[in-house]
Amino acid sequence: MASLLRIYRLGVKELWSLWRDPIMLALIVWTFSMAIWIAATARPDTLTHAALAIVDEDQSQLSMRLRLAFAPPQFNPPVLLTHDQIDPALDAGRYTFVLVIPAGFQRKLLAGRQPALQLNVDATRMSQAFTGSSYIGQIAQGEIAEFTQRYRGAAAQPVELALRARFNPALSERWFGGVMELVNNVTMLSVILAGAALIREREHGTVEHLLVMPVTPLEILLAKVWSMGAVVLLAALLSLTFVVRGALGVPIEGSVALFLAGTLLHLFATTSLGVLMATLARSMPQFGLLVILVLLPLEMLSGATTPRESIPFGVRELMQLAPTTHYVELAQAVLYRGAGLDIVWRPLVALGAIGAALFGLTLVRFRRAMAAL
């Protein structure tokens, strides 16, 4: 009982220390608010409100259909230009795409010839240029195919594809981006807060004060783990409620309590990892560099940004040892698909085992670091 009381009081000390650190408080607020909003609404690999102009030299029914086909949210309403305005408009950066519909386009098409559309692209806007060119080609081909079938009386296709999107019917990027950014930020902030708590004490000289107190390294470590984990857990709950659900309008299908239980196990692992990294670093700058080297592969190879099936087999199997892999699997299953405990018990067990292993390794390293002081 006395040991639990000491762990509680040491944890409260960590919370007061964090409360007096305005930079860390600002980081927490930013990470679980604006950072999630930006990641969900401003994804660079998605075409949104692209600037498009059209030079319509045909002035036909088909050219009018093409002009009306490019609509928000992928494109801004197209602006009509003349041919001699193309180069100045692109040079000034006013438009990313300029589509030229040549004179006689509809007539040549209905005559069985193959007229060409010209698409001028400002390739300095690389992400939009690559994605938008594909979008424009698909939209134009679809409109042309529908138009020619009507006028030529072409037979219908023998097979019709009926597309049904599960769990995200509108294929909204913000549904995926918001939740996955929350998951990644839980990992990042828990590692940073736990590691910074130890390094801050070392730089302020308060570690020596702890050593002369009747507390053990295990109690000190547990205090840092529960206090920093509690801060991130509370921030994640508030962000899920007010940012993801509220501001972004992302529907949460599954149990929030089950997701928080998985988050708690994940925080046990990541806060232990943060303290472990802090024992290896001698200063805050070294810790920052170590965080970059560790967090980037943990997040990029966890399945949060790309399906795990796209990752090479050896790396995919190696990432089974990382807590982020199982946390992403659990979050996607619970929050997107409404999975219950009968489905996500494996990631929960894996998170518990990885957390116990990391905590044990951190305790050994932490004891050695304390003995060396």
Image: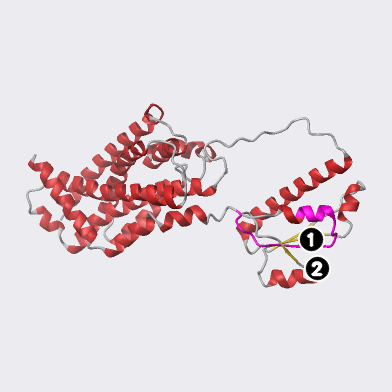
Residue 332 figure quarter = top left
Query: Is 294 drawn above or below residue 123 in the view shown?
Result: above
Query: Residue 348: horizontal and vertical position, in percent?
Result: 35, 33
User: Which residue position is annotated with label 1?
Assistant: 100
**Looking at the image, which residue sits at the far top?**
342
The residue lying at 76 percent from left, 71 percent from top is 85
Q: Is residue 316 left or right of residue 233?
A: right
Marks 2 and 1, the one that precedes in the sequence? 2
Q: Amino acid at mark 1?
A: Val
Which quadrant is the C terminus positioned in? bottom left
Of the pair 147 and 225, the residue shown nearer to us: 147
Kind of residue indicated by mark 2: His
- Percent across and percent down for residue 111 are 92, 48
Q: Which residues are magenta?
A: 47-66
User: Is residue 62 inside the magenta stretch?
Assistant: yes
Q: Report x, y in % for residue 265.
A: 30, 39
Between 30 and 220, the one lying in front of the other is 30
Which image quadrant is residue 100 in? bottom right
Mark 2–mark 1 CB contact (< 8 Å)? yes
Q: Quadrant of residue 339?
A: top left
Instruction: List the residue tagged with mark 2.
Output: 83
Say left or right for 261 vs 170: left
Q: Calculate the distance from the C-alpha at mark 2 to the C-alpha at mark 1.
A: 8 Å
